[in-house]
Image (cartoon, helix red, strand yellow):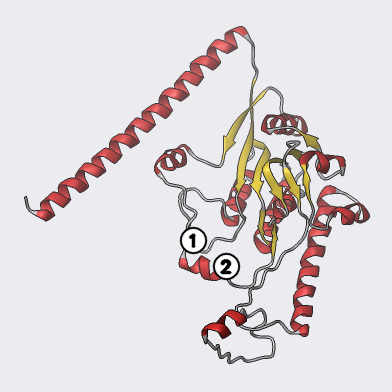
């Protein structure tokens, strides 16, 4: 058989198999939705449930929070996607409350602050915003939560880690051992500050410390503003220590111990929703179908790998 013809047959077979799987998944999703409808109807006959027209939207914030450097894929949790969904949901009149399900150790300062600002804007638009913490909601994850009306955490949630981190590498000693010498031509005294090819000078260390202190003060002030706490109550626990959800609750960093269902009930109460609200997520039915066939990838693009080596302030749990 001609190799090119054989290749085409295989390609057509794979495409047909993919389409069949896609069709089957759509049928399964449709069938499950019908089953849920039938079950809800049967339950309504025995237990009267008042269906509300009001809606609660749920947005997931998962993993390290970054400003994306590559074209957006089908399902992403970068800062741009999250802020876009917050803006979209805050402008829809039927949505009365937004729940942020946070399972993140934090991320870059700018990305975290973008989400924080958008949460405040949603609240100004009259939406109730609740943070529901998962396994981890530390550092920048807590920064985001502090902008919400209320925070719900599990007793075993890892949170806290209030502080700023800047990591700089130094390979000068290694390069000397293997005989590599780097020449740097620069326009100003501080242009190569943080270079991995030499030691920091005392002046450069001072500059970086001032940057850290400035970002740290922004973090503290955001917690004070968002949580309506006194600065003197925040500072003693803002030394980078991690806290359990229960410890955070005892120190006033969390409003309630509970799970996602408790967060929904709290959102209903604060938004004055009567009856059973409609629950929506940031994922459309098409997103869910695509997600079935998309493989989660932890790989970074070349651009992102180079960016990791650059100087970046982070609100992140190490």
Extreme residue toward the front, this view = 177
Count of numbered circles on the image: 2
The spot of residue 310 in percent (x, y) is 60, 73
Q: Is residue 4 above or below residue 69?
A: above
Q: Are marks 2 and 1 in contact (CB under 8 Å)?
A: yes
- Foreground of the two, 273 or 296: 296
- Name the one closer to the observer, 172 or 229: 172
Asked where in the image residue 14 lies, by quadrant, the reply is: top left
Q: Which residue appears at 77% of the width and 69% of the height?
A: 212
Q: Residues within 10 Å of mark 1 (few under 14, many from 20)?
A: few
Name the spot of residue 171 as percent of width and height, x first.
60, 78
- Label annotation for residue 180: none
Indicate left or right for 173 with 130 as reference: left
Q: Quadrant of residue 264?
A: top right
Q: Gap between marks 2 and 1, in whole Å? A: 10 Å
Classify mark 1: helix, strand or loop.
loop
- Residue 252: x %, y % from top left: 86, 43
Label 2 belongs to which residue? Answer: 308
Q: Which residue is mark 1?
A: 300
Residue extending furthest left?
1
């Amino acid at each position: 058989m001609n190799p090119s013809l054989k290749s085409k047959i295989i390609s057509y077979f794979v495409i047909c198999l993919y389409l069949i799987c896609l069709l089957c998944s759509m049928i399964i999703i449709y069938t499950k939705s019908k089953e849920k409808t039938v079950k809800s109807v049967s339950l309504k006959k025995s237990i009267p449930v008042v269906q509300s027209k009001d809606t609660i939207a749920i947005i997931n914030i998962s993993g390290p929070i970054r400003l994306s450097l590559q074209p957006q894929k089908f399902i992403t949790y970068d800062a741009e996607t999250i802020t876009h969904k917050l803006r979209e949901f805050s402008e829809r009149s039927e949505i009365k409350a937004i729940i942020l399900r946070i399972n993140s150790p934090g991320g870059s300062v700018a990305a975290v602050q973008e989400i924080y600002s958008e949460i405040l804007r949603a609240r100004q638009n009259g939406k109730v915003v609740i943070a529901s913490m998962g396994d981890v909601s530390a550092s920048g994850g807590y920064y985001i939560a502090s902008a919400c009306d209320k925070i719900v955490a599990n007793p075993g949630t890892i949170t806290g880690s209030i502080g700023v981190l800047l990591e700089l590498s130094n390979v000068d000693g290694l390069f000397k051992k293997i005989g590599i010498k780097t020449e740097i031509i620069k326009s100003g005294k501080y242009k190569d500050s943080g270079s991995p090819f030499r030691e920091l000078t005392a002046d450069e260390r001072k500059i970086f410390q001032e940057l850290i202190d400035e970002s740290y003060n922004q973090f503290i002030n955001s917690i004070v503003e968002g949580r309506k706490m006194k600065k003197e109550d925040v500072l003693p626990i803002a030394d980078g220590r991690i806290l359990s959800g229960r410890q955070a609750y005892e120190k006033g960093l969390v409003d309630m111990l509970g799970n996602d269902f408790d967060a929904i009930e709290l959102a209903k109460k604060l938004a004055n929703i009567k009856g059973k609200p409609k629950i929506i997520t940031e994922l459309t039915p098409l997103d869910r179908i695509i997600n079935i066939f998309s493989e989660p990838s932890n790989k970074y693009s070349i651009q992102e790998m180079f960016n990791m080596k650059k100087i970046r302030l982070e609100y992140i749990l190490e």
